[in-house]
Amino acid sequence: MTLRTAVLSASAVLALAGCGDDPSSQAQSAETKRNGGLYDAVDVCGLATDDQLKAALGEAPGAKERRDTDSLKACAVDGASGDFYLFLVLVRPSMGAPQQVAYDKNAAKDAKSIDATTFSSVGDGEAHVETASGELVVRVSLVYYQDGGGITDGPAVVDRLHTLLGAITRKM
């Protein structure tokens, strides 16, 4: 449990990735959408259906665990295999969502832009997609447990995470 907590905490600190269809409309939407009040009442574990989680995981979802802290709302969703999990994070940053995503992107290793407010990063055992959605930052990560395996097809995993991120941001 200690290793899992450390991995979850590290995932929360890493850069978030986002999604959007048209970069110009996404940038405008991120600047004008007033959704910060949603943060106080949201249950991050309820932002995606089991079917959406299954599509992102590539297998049935297992147990969901709220992982909220003082600075973020989060949910860990185990894959049925027990080899990896999804980590869904929602943050209401003090600096503004687009600025936070830009900061996170600069801090991420091998970050790649998806659109004006969304980026991804992929390592051996984890993949992340982060975006600005109004006043909030949303991040979806797939993380392998130690000795659980690794990311073998980064672009496919990023596509699945990006699709899930899109479904989540449409609800906000």
Image (cartoon, rainbow, N blue to C red):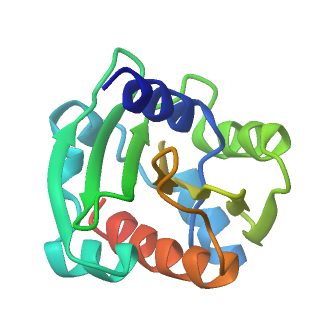
Q: Is residue 23 left or right of residue 166?
A: right
The correct choice, above or below, for 108 with respect to 17 in the image is above
137 left or right, relative to 47:
right
Position of residue 140 measured from the top left corner of the image (x, y, whole percent): 47, 57
Residue in the image at 36% along x and 55% along y: 85
Work out whether 161 lies above or below 63: below
**Can you give x and y, in whole percent of width and height, for residue 84 in the image?**
40, 57
Residue 154 against residue 92 in the figure, above or below: below
Which residue occupies the extreme front position in the image? 147
Depth check, front residue: 35 or 165:
165
Task: Name the residue rendered at 38%, 59% in the picture.
Answer: 83
Q: Report which quarter residue 103 is drawn in.
A: top right
| Quarter holding residue 152 | bottom right
Quadrant where the N terminus is found in the figure: top left
For the point 35% across and 14% down, the residue is 70
Residue 144 in the image: state x and y as whole percent.
49, 54
**Can you say which quadrant of the picture contains the C terminus?**
bottom left
**Place of residue 161 in the rendered image (x, y in percent of width and height, measured from the top left):** 49, 71
Residue at the top extreme, as displayed: 70
- Number of numbered markers: 0
